[in-house]
Amino acid sequence: MSHKLVLEAGRTERQYWRDLWRYRELFYFLAWRDFMVRYKQTLVGVAWSLIRPVLTMAVLALYMMLTKQPTGGVPVPLFVFAAMLPWQFFSTAMSESGTSLINNSNLISKVYFPRLVMPVSAVIVTLADFLISGVFMALLMVVFRFVPPVHIFFLPLFILMVFAAAVGTGLWMAALMVKYRDVRFILQFIVQFGLYASPVILPPGKVPQWSHGLPMQALYSLNPAVGIIDGFRWCLLGGDNVIYWPGFSVSVAVVVLVGFTGIWYFRKTERTFADNI
């Protein structure tokens, strides 16, 4: 059987999103490859995905107990780890997707496929780590005999929200890093600073809604992790861990903005990746 090769100007641009579906198996291949490479020949295997958030939780929980920070009647480890779940997923996914193009430079320079596959598949790999941490969260609830509220059924919506935030920021970082290699240092700073700029150890209601005539809670919610973490605590812990809905709407708007602009900028610069990388 003979095959006909058709060269048509603009064909790739018009069929880009259809090509994403055609290359759907590449999502699986890259995600599985990255997952295996990450844990191949490691001492404790996939447990590495749990060790870092657990150790971070232990340090932050100790700090909260020593400083007697309020947690809304929730055990301190649960309060901290409920926030570590989305933050660890977001920060790791952003870092992995941000470096995905640089780490696969040989593949990009030789083979055509929608480059969007790489950063998104990196986020999918991190989702597996998130699920492992979620199992540990469930075990913590059993240990402390804590029954989650009925809000837990809304948890998939907040998981989708943190996934979208990770993809949007990851696309920005991946596209910028191809042209400006020092973006990797900015990325490390964002991850380190973001842990303290997000309400991981911040008690509910600590940030006032208004101060000196400024909507402090709304401004604080410009960090999309604020609304996401508050949503996770509301779903998993309940009680005094409530959502400040005006601030949450700001976080949602930021996630949507970052997502759409990330796709726009990635697509705008994608044709230059092979030359700059």
Image (cartoon, grey):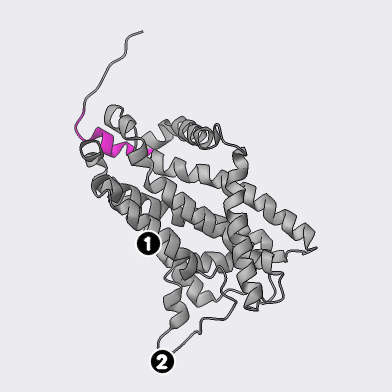
Residue at the spot of label 1: 257
Instruction: Judge the density around disc 1: few (<14), some (14-19), many (≥20) Cα neighbours within 10 Å.
Output: few
* Quarter where residue 74 is shown: bottom right
Q: Magenta span has 127?
A: no
Left or right for 9, reference 17: left
Indicate the quadrant containing the N terminus: top left, top right, bottom left or bottom right.
Answer: top left
Per the picture, the main secondary structure of the magenta-coloured stretch is: helix
Camera-side residue of 277 and 216: 277
Name which residue lies at 56% across and 55% down.
159
Name which residue lies at 53% across and 64% down.
228
Left or right for 195, reference 173: right
* Quarter where residue 187 is shown: bottom left
Camera-side residue of 186 and 249: 186
101 in relation to 236, above or below: above
In the structure shown, which secondary structural element does the residue marked by tag 1 occupy? helix
Name which residue lies at 45% across and 78% down.
218
Q: Distance between the residues labelled 1 and 2?
A: 28 Å
**Mark 1 or 2, nearer chain start:** 2
4 in relation to 150, above or below: above
Residue 138: give its label. Answer: none
Q: What residue type is labelled 1?
A: Leu
Left or right for 173, reference 34: left
Q: Tell which tag, 1 or 2, sits nearer the viewer.
A: 2
Residue 8 position within the rendered picture, expressed as x and y whole percent measured from the top left: 21, 29
Instruction: Judge the density around disc 2: few (<14), some (14-19), many (≥20) Cα neighbours within 10 Å.
Output: few
Which stretch did the figure color magenta? 8-17
* Quarter where residue 259 is shown: bottom left
Residue 160 visible at all? no
In the structure shown, which secondary structural element does the residue marked by tag 2 occupy? loop
Residue at the spot of label 2: 212
Indicate the quadrant containing the C terminus: top left, top right, bottom left or bottom right.
Answer: top left
Residue 191 position within the rendered picture, expressed as x and y whole percent measured from the top left: 43, 59
